[in-house]
Amino acid sequence: MDFGSFLSAPELKLKIVTYRDIFQNKALIEDRFGEEYIAKSALIKLDSVDLKNLSLKKGETVILKNSFGKVVVKAEASDSETPHRGIAYMPNSPWSNRLVSTETGGTGVPRFKEIEATVVSAKGEKITELEF
Amino acid sequence: MLSEGEQMEKEYYVCTGCGLLCEDIETELEKRAISKVYTACRVGVAHMKENPGTAKFWVEGKNTDEATAIGKAAALLKAAKNPLIFGLDNSTNEAQKKAIELAKKLNATLDDSSSFSFGPLMAALLQKKFKTCSLDEVRDKADVSVFWGADPSDSHPRQLSKFAYFPRGKEKQRGWEEERTAIAIDIRKTHTAKICGNEFYQVPLGGDAEFMEALIAGLSGKLPKTSYKYPPKKLLELANLLKAAKFGVIFVGQDLLYSLETLAPLFRLMDTLNEKAKGDFFLIPLLEAYNMRGFNENLFEETGFVNRVKFEAGSVKHGPEYSVVESLKAKAVDAALIIGSDPLANLPYSIIKELLEIPLITIDPCETLTSKKAQVSIRSGVSGVEAGGSALRIDGVRVAFKPVFESKCPSDEEILLKIMEAF
């Protein structure tokens, strides 16, 4: 029996910063339900040390979770030259919006930009499908 | 090479892929669809080709005819006590004005995406709280362009090549090599920041307001200090660079707006720059949707507000409670007409759940997550490709456009008119 299966997967707390990506935007216009848009949207870019500490390899899926929602997306190391441990980048998308707080304090402005969530390996689970 | 006669016949079209409204687009048609697009950026090419060409009408997920869909949409709106009209940032000025008329008629709540992005900045701009200028002036005169929380290389791909950095302008004949400086201030090294080279200033998450205050201190001859210990020497170098500007522009992106609790530090910085710099400093919001500026200006002209309004028996109310987010959270609206927007993709999940509880009508050139869940869904023509009209560029310049080809898809304006006629 694999002893590792009894150990809980390492978990990290993250601040997720969303961003715009021209290639993702182009894929959205071409086919918002297509594979290319999903591949360029359901994605989180982590600091390479964070990725290693989560025992993840490029392209494996992770579960991102907070009190507002949970999504499974692909993880990869960011190409940032400066380290950014604890901070991860995610393209603006329906997947990132699943984690956005609705506590607006009555201002009408959700916090789209700085999302707090935990990340853990999804152990092969597939990317969350957008069903409502 | 084209002869003079052939060149005279060349037709140029407008791309409505983003708020730059590029007017120099050439296309080739094949079987009533655009097969080739010239001059546009990556997003623009995809956008111009996005034309399925046929009108489609759905009621409860089933294909139907125009009259049935329009009739059902009108009936749902008429039956609602407090309908919401949302979107319109991707619609023409003409459609926006029609939607304002419809909102008045229905005593509806009316809002757009500026409600959770550029709203306060656009209100301040229209109230003339800071200096702004046109993109043509930027091309002809600007020597310093600052991209703050803005990444036009991804959001407005031709902004640097057409206006802010690379072109030769009337008073900037030596261009970016000698006469222009581009500066990026951001929390991460964006594609635009890479172009700015050494003039990239990386600010920690949420640190923009403090960076502005430190810059104001630097411009005023004081030592610039931040709690995150940004090197004062680098801040002073930036202050000196800005001080020397003869024609400076700050392009404000959405990411900066999300970082600031209030716009006061930004306005203080603009005032200080205009007091201390050699020349004038202007601010242009980098609005993303092609006609958000139009929505804000058209509504402002009509009501004095840029968004978040509720019409009521000849009067107009305004406030956060009339924002799309708060009105849905409070369950204050009982039907929604969504035009050219996909809130199911763009809003937080718990807000979406409220939207799914009420009857939905969508008008959009594309099938979206929202249109798939709508009781009535109408496919409209793509602006600038299948439908003509006008829009306001991010700097407020009005751009008129004609369709590339005649389409059977009705424009947003025509659909809204027909819904009103069906009451």
Image: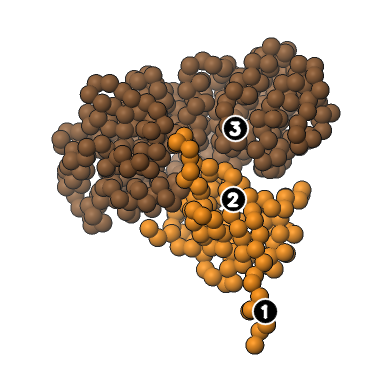
Chain colours: A orange, B brown
Query: Identity of the amino acid at label 3?
Result: Leu
In percent of width and height, residue A132 lies at 38, 58
Measure the C-alpha gap from mark 3 to mark 2: 18 Å
Residue B351 spot, x, y in % from top left = 40, 47
Q: Nearer the viewer, residue B414 or B360?
A: B360
Identify which amino acid the numbered label 1 is placed on.
Gly
Q: Which residue is mark 2?
A: A116
Disc 1 designates what residue? A4
Q: Earlier in the sequence, mark 1 or mark 2?
A: 1
- Assign a secondary structure to mark 3: loop
For this view, does B282 lie left or right of residue A108? right
Residue at x 25% of width, y 36% of height? B82
Q: Amino acid at mark 2?
A: Glu
Asked if labels 3 and 2 share a chain, the reply is no
Q: Residue at x 44, y 46 (%)?
A: B347
Asked if residue B368 lies left or right of residue B269, the reply is: left
Q: Quadrant of the N terminus of chain B?
A: top right
* Mark number displayed over residue B147: none
- Give residue B260's mark: 3
Marked residue chain, label 2: A
Residue drawn where x is 57% and y is 26% of the image: B263
Q: Secondary structure at mark 2?
A: strand
Q: Is B218 left or right of A95, judged from the image as shown?
A: right
| x and y percentages locating residue A50 in the rendered image | 71, 59
